[in-house]
Image (cartoon, helix red, strand yellow):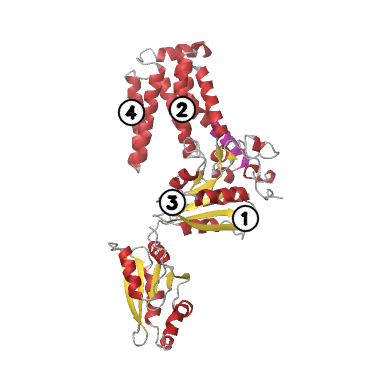
Amino acid sequence: MEYNIPLKKTLKENLDELKKILNECDDIIFRELKVGSNKSVSMELIFVDGMIDRDDLSSFVLRPLLRISGDILSNGNKSIDSLIDVLSKENIQISDMKVIQNMEEVIKAVLSGETVLLIDGSEKAIDLSTRGWPSRSIGEPVSEETVRGPRDGMTETLKTNIALIRRRIRDTNLKVKMMQIGKRSKTDIAVMYMEDIVEPKLLNETYRRLNNLNVDEIIDSSMLENLIEDHCYSPFPQIENTERPDAVAASLYEGRVAIIVDNSPFALLVPATIGTLMQSTEDYYTRWSVASIVRIIRYFAAFLAVLAPSLYIAVTSYHPGLLPTRLTYYVAASRVNVPFPSVIEAFLMEITLELLREAGTRISGPIGTTIGIVGGLIIGQAAVDAGIVSPLMIIIVSVTTISSFAIPSYELATALRFFRFLFMIYAAVLGLYGVMLGIIVMITHMAKLDSFGIPFTSPYSGLGREKGDLRDTIIKVPFQNMKKRPRFTFPKNRTRLK
């Protein structure tokens, strides 16, 4: 609801209007003040209890106001009209304040954790920055732990997250554009980019999508991600998220745009490609040779996470002749007592593992870890002893699950889990031909995806043809050879090392 009406000159009228709008909001405090030598001027402080720093309010606002003498009020109405300037320049000691003249601005400031000062006889109000709600202290990132590298992670406070990024980029070209999204929530959003690097079309497209949103609330960055991504029906993420400020800074240096959402510890990075989603922050804190080997293992893990169960189904059901003779005898012997076909066997174990994964996620702490480990061991061993599944199936499912954990992006790993079940169905119907059909379908789908106008398959598609673009993909070359920024973001300044 909009309240775009100017403030009245009478304090009582303004207060009546505010109390009518904020009816039954008992956490909003109205603090009346009488100032001047003869207490001739009435003022009102308005704030939300629990969202302000009471020490700042008492020390730097209340005390200076109550000490105002009658000298500045000696010239009648003229002094009342100029009292706003006198207070802001000589009395109130809050570092950040601004003058507002609209009821909508007053309500927005109060509900954002600010304190608003209304003065009888003035059509202006002062917005005092006294935000001080309880917040989580800076700690290590939970979802992106590293052995070597910075240990600080982002929090749910927008200004703290901006400061963590600004600390790493001490450059005047780092721009921060503040905006609010959500007709009811009015969630603060910060768009961050490097002015001399970012491609203008990418920046304009980001602003266009954010400005066109017409939604009641933005509770978390994931909601904003779903609203501005290109293909909402695709299981693949087209926007990268991270809770590491160093990862955000590195992305900004590459010409990408970061979107920071208040109340969320995860920043959004656009554009996102399969290349960026398969990279880990720790790759840049270890030796290039070790990072290259780890990346190759990571891509092999993605292959296993998608195809291992379907290959087992296809080979055991349709193509046992592809296996060596002795291995074929072992597989056949291990499945003698199993009453189900391999596809039912695989689906039973995969669904059981998904249930254990979900249970471990919902139950925090040591109990969740215990459910995942002990539950998997007990159920797997019991299933083999009962003859429901074969020992080889337990190995296949275990390797598949471990491989999915090796993928840096949780959203990408989830998408691959979705395609794993599709591949299992294809393999059950058509064998290896179905697996190949599934690969074609998945790669075709990925080739059709875009992320803010950038092909999702970059830099392995056409945007990786230029010399040097593949030096930081499946393998990582030494920093001395990474003289150019990646071309898929079309940065204005590609040179980063001379």
The answer to the question of whether label 4 and label 3 lie on touching residues, with beta carbons closer than 8 A, is: no
Observer able to see residue 194: yes
Residue annotated with mark 1: 195
Mark 3 vs mark 1: which is more N-terminal? 1
Instruction: Give the CA distance from mark 3 to mark 1.
Output: 25 Å
Looking at the picture, does residue 171 appear above or below residue 366? below
Q: Which residue is mark 4?
A: 378
Q: Residue 23's x, y, as percent?
A: 29, 63
Q: Main secondary structure of the magenta part?
A: helix
Nearer to the camera, 12 or 139: 12
Q: Are marks 3 and 1 in contact (CB under 8 Å)?
A: no
Q: Nearer the viewer, residue 368 or 131?
A: 131
Q: Amino acid at mark 2?
A: Arg
Amino acid bearing label 4:
Ile
Q: Are discs 4 and 2 less than 8 Å apart at CB? A: no
Where residue 252 appears, as percent x and y from the top left, is: 58, 51
Of badges 4 and 2, nearer the viewer stands 2
Q: Position of residue 132 (x, y in %)?
A: 40, 64
Does label 4 or label 3 sit earlier along the sequence?
3
Choose mark 4 or mark 3, whichever is in front. 3
Question: Which residue has dot 2 on it?
Answer: 420
